[in-house]
Each structure stands twice: as C-alpha cells, then as structure tokens.
Image (cartoon, rainbow, N blue to C red):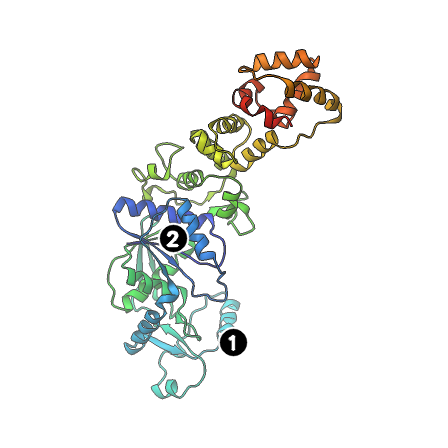
Amino acid sequence: MLRFTSSPTGDLHIGDLRLALFNALISRQRNEPLIVRIEDTDTERNIEGKDKEILEILALFGIEYTDVIYQSSHLRYHRAMAIQLLHDKKAFNCFCTPAELDRKRELAKAKNLPFRYDDTCTHLRPEETIDNENPFTIRLKKPTEPITVNDLLNGESTFAPDDIDSFIIMGAEKYPTYNFAGAVDDMLADISLVIRGEEHVNDTPRQIAVRHALGYDKNVEYAHLPLILNDSGKKMHKSDNAFNVKWLLEEGFLPEAIGNYLILIGNKTPEEIFTIADAVAWFDLKSISKAPERFDLDKLRLINREHLKRMDEKELSRFVGFADADIGAIAKIYLEEAATLKELRAKIQAIFGPKNVPGEFAEAAETMRAAIKAAPFFETFDDFQAHIMQKSGLEGSDFVAPLRILLTGAEHGPELADLYAHLKNYIGEIIK
C-alpha cells in the first residue's frame, strides 16, 4: 500500500504534486493500492473546501487512488495507542510548561547546543501524575538504540537516541502530533513505501520509533526527494507563483505538460516529451537526482507547447472557446508565438473581438471592411486578397497592415495565408 498525504491548509504546491505523481507511478508499477490521506487535524488552519480542491486536482492529473482517509477520523486510534504506550511505560506524561521548555531551549541555544528534553518528567512517581492538575503532554521515551533509515535515494543514515529524543506524541489538548499521527496511520493502512520531501528526513526515525514502541515490525521503505528550488536557487515559497499548481493551471499549462515536467526534472528519461501513462513503463525512483532542482518556467513552457501541438485540433478548440477543428488548427499556428492556453485564448479572442485600429490605418480599414463585407466567398487566400485589393483600391502597407488588423486584431503574427485556410468560413463573424 502506498499513500499520498496533503493538508487542507492551503493550495496544493508542485512539490506535493510531484510526490503524488511518483506515488501513482509506483502504485501502478507494483500493482499496489494508493490511498489519499487528508491530514486535517490542525483544525484552526484548515480551509473549508481545500480537501475537495486537492482531490479535483489529482483527478485532473489522472491520479487514481482506492480510498480517501481523513486523519481526524482516526483520532480514537491515536488516543488508544497513546494510552497503550503509557500502560507499557514506553511513554510518559510531561507537565513541563511551554515557558519552561522555551527557557531551556534558550539556554541550549546560548551554549550553541541542540535542545534536548532533559527527562524532567520521565520518572515521575504515580502520585505525582495522578494528583497533578496541570495540563500535560505525552512524550514517547527516546529509544535505547540508534535507529537506521535505509533511504532508496540517499542510502543509509543512522540516528542516535539523543537525536530522536523523548518527543511529544500527544499535545496538551490531546490531539496527536504530526509524527505520531502519521506513524499510526501508516500502520493502520499497512503502508509499504513512503515517498516524501527531504525536509521530512528527521521525522522518519521518530516515526520508526513510534512503530517499534507499538510492536509493529514491518519494514517500511522510504525515499526522500530533494527540494524544488525557485529560479533564484532558493527554497520555493507560497509567494512564488510557479509553486502553486492552481496558478499553473489557470495560466493555461496542461496537466499532461506539468506532469511531464515534474517527472522529467532531475531524472533520466528515455525521451523528453511523454505522458504520465508512458512513464509507468520506465520510471525508476532510484534514478532521481539527489541534488535540488530549479523550477524552470521557460522549460515548462516549451514542454507545454509540445503537448499542445500533439493535441487533437477539435479538442484544442474547446479549450479556447469553440468546438471546431479549424479553430484548433488556428491555435496550433499561433503556437509559433504562444505556449499556454491562456495565451492562445487571447490570440483567438483578438480575432473574433472588436478591433483596435491605429489612427493611421483607420480610414483604410473602413474602406477595406466595406469591401470584405460585400465580397463573395473565396476558397483561397490569393483570390480573396486580389478581390479586396481591387475593390478597395488599397495597396502596399496601406493594404497589408489594415487587412492583418481586421483579420487577426494584431499588427504582427503568422502568415495570413496560413490563417485564412481556417478562417475563411468565419469571415462574416470576424469582420463586423
């Protein structure tokens, strides 16, 4: 069983989407189910509707899963297992206040030492616990032996007991912490492989410690992917537009192209342009680069253009507001200078929308407009052009510039003859 996790506290970002894609590919390769886990226990930060938005985006990318699990529905299991750990004396109640811990943390910082819990509450006598009315957290006792993590990408790492520490598994409000809830939920789902970002490297030994304490001895595989950096070589933040999958979709990047790019970067692939379905045959998690990769929006534009070129013309026309292969063919001609659906829509809208004619061409344009409206249908551009030139009496730049503006809404662009082959049936709508 594999899992993809996401929190409904903000928009889905490209790092998360990359994880979802990799999980989906390996799920299909191994013929193991994939579940989606919505980690919604941080109720104060949850945004209404974000869970559904996440699932809708996964559907756009063709990511199939067998179940959606809301972490909040497992609260009774989290609490039951915390109680079990207390009974087994593998966890303990901690009455240290946040202020006390902050003070100790500052002392450690002043000495240039990492903060470690000092076992103040580890060996409290029963009466000190029962009679204590102060709020308390529950901490897992730090392991007695080092924990080794074998990462499919980065190899073996060993964490000493002091690095793992006696960490909190249940907060004072009796809600599980990230590492405890995640470890328990992975146990409940019988997860075999966890793929996540390298920022979670230090979480892994803690989650292994939870499983060991609960007597769960299944060997779970791990792979921690390197970060995706922005174009400045820094960690991407929400302020980076390209960080946001929704923004990329709104800008007119195809899901197929975004998926292609996220599988391609830092990877060895047999070809540069491919579909997510194609990648199932050759994708290898172990071939992913260990180094961070910069998100290159220009490269994504090139990949998006190639996917648009491959699209069926009638299907493409629907994305720009029509249902006609001729309009799709026009859109493909404009791929010489456009790379996204948003840019293509602007080109098509300019053809069919009101024309903004510069003053220097205003008179010529009106003369030409009248000639075009009165003209019969012409199959070829050469015949159309010859007729309009004769009827309008215009020639040279006084003819070419107004004609281009009237037909396309722009002074520059693709060859008019190429466009006319697909525009000829729409002349009456274009010239109003």
Q: Quadrant of residue 389?
A: top right
Residue carrying label 2? 196
Using the rendered image of the protein, determine whether residue 355 is visible from the camera's viewpoint. yes
Q: Secondary structure at mark 2?
A: strand
Q: Is residue 13 left or right of residue 186?
A: right
- Where is the C terminus found, in terms of image quarters? top right
Q: Secondary structure at mark 1?
A: helix
Q: Quadrant of residue 142?
A: bottom left
**Cα–Cα gap, marks 1 and 2:** 33 Å
The amino acid sitting under disc 2 is Arg
The amino acid sitting under disc 1 is Ala
Using the rendered image of the protein, determine whether residue 226 is visible from the camera's viewpoint. no
Callout 1 crowding tier (Cα within 10 Å): few <14, some 14–19, many ≥20: few
Mark 1 or 2: in front is: 2
Q: Nearer the viewer, residue 179 or 44?
A: 44
Sequence order check, earlier mark of 1 and 2: 1
Against 55, is 356 above or below? above
Q: Nearer the viewer, residue 204 or 425?
A: 425
Q: Nearer the viewer, residue 366 or 182?
A: 366
Q: Nearer the viewer, residue 342 or 109?
A: 342
User: Residue 324: percent from the left, percent from the top?
Assistant: 48, 30
| Circle on res. 47 | none
- Where is the N terminus found, in terms of image quarters? bottom left
User: Residue 430: percent from the left, percent from the top?
Assistant: 61, 27
User: Residue 192: percent from the left, percent from the top?
Assistant: 27, 55
User: Residue 178: percent from the left, percent from the top?
Assistant: 40, 64
Mark 1 in CB contact with mark 2 (< 8 angstroms): no
Residue carrying label 1? 99
